[in-house]
Image (spheres, grey):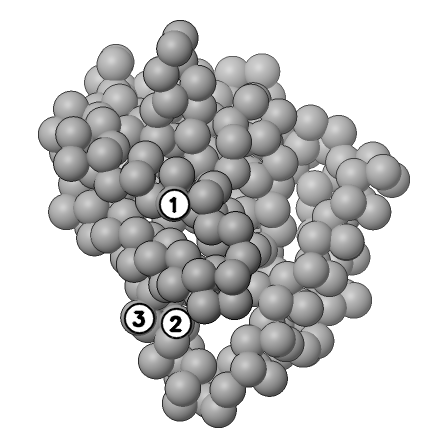
Amino acid sequence: MDIDGEFKLFLTSQIKEAIRVKQERRRESSRRELLKSLRDRGCEIAEELPGYDENDLVGLIGEIVINDFAVNLGVEPILPKWHYTGTSKSSGIDFVGREKLGDMWELALYEAKHLHDEVRNTKTECYTLIKGKFRIGLDEFESEKTELDLASILLQLENSIRLCKAIESDASSIQEYRAFISSSLQNNRYRLNVVALVDTEYCSETTFEQSISKMPNPLEVGKNHPVSLNLIKAKSLEKTTNEVCEIYVGTI
C-alpha cells in the first residue's frame, strides 16, 4: 500500500469526520448522559472526552485504513467503530461488515493493529512485534467477548431503529443489518480478521511469513471461527502518521 498525496487527503477528511462525530456527541448531552449513552451501546471510553492524544490518533488511523482495506476487498460496511464514536479509545469490534460468499452473506469482523511507537522505538525485530499484535487480536476475539460485543451492536441498531421510527425515517437497511447480525450470532457464524499495519521501512519480503510462523493453519478461535491474519505494509505510513498527529493532537 502506498500512502500517496491522494490517500493523505482521504485520511485527513476521515479524521475531520471523526472530529465532527466526537464534537456532536459532546454537544448532544451532558458529560454524564453521554457516557451512559455510549456505555449502553457497549462503548466504554475514558471518564471524559478530551482532545485527541497521539495514541488515540494512531489507533484512529489504523481503524480508518482497515475500513478502507475491507471495503476495497468487497466487504459491505455495517458498523465501522470509529465512525460512530469518533475515537479509537472505545471498546468493541473495530469494523463490522458483511461479505458475499457465493449466494450467502457472511459476517466479517476486523480488528486493527497499527504499529507505530513500538516499531520505531525498539531494536526488536519487526516480525516479533507483528506476531505479538496478532496474538493480542486473537485474544480480543475470544468467543464470549465477541458475542457480547455483537450483542451490544444489536442493542445499538435497535436504538437506531426506534429513532428512525420516531422521526418517520426509513429504517429498512438497519433492520436488515440487525436481522443479519442476530442470525449470524444465533448460528455462531462469522469470520474474524486481524490486520496489522506497519511502515514498509521496517519490513522485508519475509516479514509476514516470520510473523505467522508456528501458528496453526488453518487458524481458528473459539467455536471454530476461522481467522485471517493480514499484514498491510504501507509506504510513508510513519511520515503520514506523524504529520496527522502534529496537526490534530489536542483537537476537539
Q: Which residue is under mark 3?
A: 40
- 39 w.r.t. 196: above or below: below
Q: Earlier in the sequence, mark 1 or mark 2?
A: 2
- Badge 3: how crowded within 10 Å, few (<14), some, or many (20+)? some
Q: Which residue is under mark 2?
A: 38
Q: Residue drawn at (20%, 46%), measured in percent from left and top?
A: 147
Q: Are marks 3 and 2 in contact (CB under 8 Å)?
A: yes
Q: Quadrant of the N terminus?
A: top right
Q: Which mark is residue 42?
A: none
- Circle 1: element type: helix
- Circle 2: element type: helix
At label 2, which amino acid type do we have?
Leu
Residue 206, percent across and down? Answer: 51, 16
Q: Residue drawn at (15%, 36%), measured in percent from left and top?
A: 186
Residue 245, percent across and down? Answer: 71, 63
Q: Which residue is under mark 1?
A: 175
At label 1, which amino acid type do we have?
Gln
Residue 117, percent across and down? Answer: 56, 54
230 sits left or right of 10 in the view: left
Q: Residue 6, located in which quarter of the rendered image?
A: top right
Q: Residue 58, located in which quarter of the rendered image?
A: bottom right
Disc 1 from disc 3: Cα separation: 19 Å
Residue 194 seen anywhere in this rendered image of the structure: no
Residue 199 seen anywhere in this rendered image of the structure: yes
Disc 1 from disc 2: Cα separation: 21 Å
At label 3, which amino acid type do we have?
Asp
